Image (tube, helix red, strand yellow):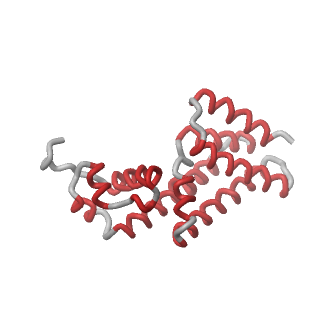
């Protein structure tokens, strides 16, 4: 794009760029001018979508919680198959679609920001609660369901951001871990 040409960006474009910066530089790296440069627009374009940097950061947290937690839970609730297949379906969805790819960056942010901490904890609590419910539905006792659910959530959050396996290897490991989690 030649400088001076108009480029129409959506709010989502700004959020996705914000997430990329968050992963690489942390929340401190999220600067309006930096994002605008990466998107190839002037910083004035930012203000069509956000009042200020604070609103962008709040929107990043809201988007992360709603799209990476609430929407995934709702989709898993809609799954019509047997309970153990629902668990596999959710694990495969999270691990192949990148739903947990921002979790580590949000966790780091939550270590120094009370607002981010509150959102992170609320989202993780939702994940733990839903995972516990899924394992209870699959026939495990309450304590077993809670332990297995927590292991599943923590595994997916960590594996998505810390391990860079090939998709084939990742799927094989995912299937193995799923089998460990669902077998008594």
Residue 104 placement (x, y as % from top left): 56, 53
Decide which of 40, 133 is in the foreground and name it: 40
Decide which of 86, 120 is in the foreground and name it: 120
Residue 88 placement (x, y as % from top left): 68, 39
151 vs 27: above or below = above
Farthest bottom residue? 114
Q: Which residue is found at the position 32% from the left and 69% from the top? A: 52
Q: Is residue 61 left or right of residue 143?
A: left
Q: How many marks?
A: 0
Q: Is residue 174 left or right of residue 72?
A: right
Q: Which residue is found at the position 73% from the left and 38% from the top? A: 178
Residue 64 placement (x, y as % from top left): 50, 57
Quarter holding the C terminus is top right
Quarter holding the N terminus is top left
Q: Which residue is found at the position 67% from the left and 29% from the top? A: 172
Residue 40 placement (x, y as % from top left): 24, 48
Q: Which residue is found at the position 73% from the left and 53% from the top? A: 150
Q: Is residue 39 left or right of residue 4?
A: right
């Amino acid at each position: 794009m030649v400088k001076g040409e108009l480029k129409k960006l959506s709010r989502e474009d700004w959020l996705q760029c914000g997430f990329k910066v968050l992963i690489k530089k942390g929340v401190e790296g999220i600067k309006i001018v930096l994002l605008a440069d990466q998107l190839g627009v002037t910083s004035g374009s930012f203000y069509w979508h956000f009042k200020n940097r604070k609103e962008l950061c709040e929107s990043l947290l809201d988007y992360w919680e709603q799209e990476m937690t609430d929407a995934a839970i709702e989709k898993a609730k809609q799954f019509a198959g047997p309970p153990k297949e629902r668990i596999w379906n959710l694990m495969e969805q999270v691990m192949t679609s990148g739903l947990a790819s921002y979790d580590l960056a949000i966790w780091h942010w939550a270590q120094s920001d009370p607002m981010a901490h509150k959102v992170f904890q609320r989202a993780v609590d939702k994940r733990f609660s839903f995972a516990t419910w899924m394992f209870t539905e699959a026939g495990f006792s309450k304590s077993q369901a809670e332990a297995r659910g927590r292991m599943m959530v923590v595994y997916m959050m960590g594996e998505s951001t810390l391990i860079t396996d090939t998709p084939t290897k990742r799927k094989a490991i995912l299937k193995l871990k799923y089998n460990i989690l669902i077998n008594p």
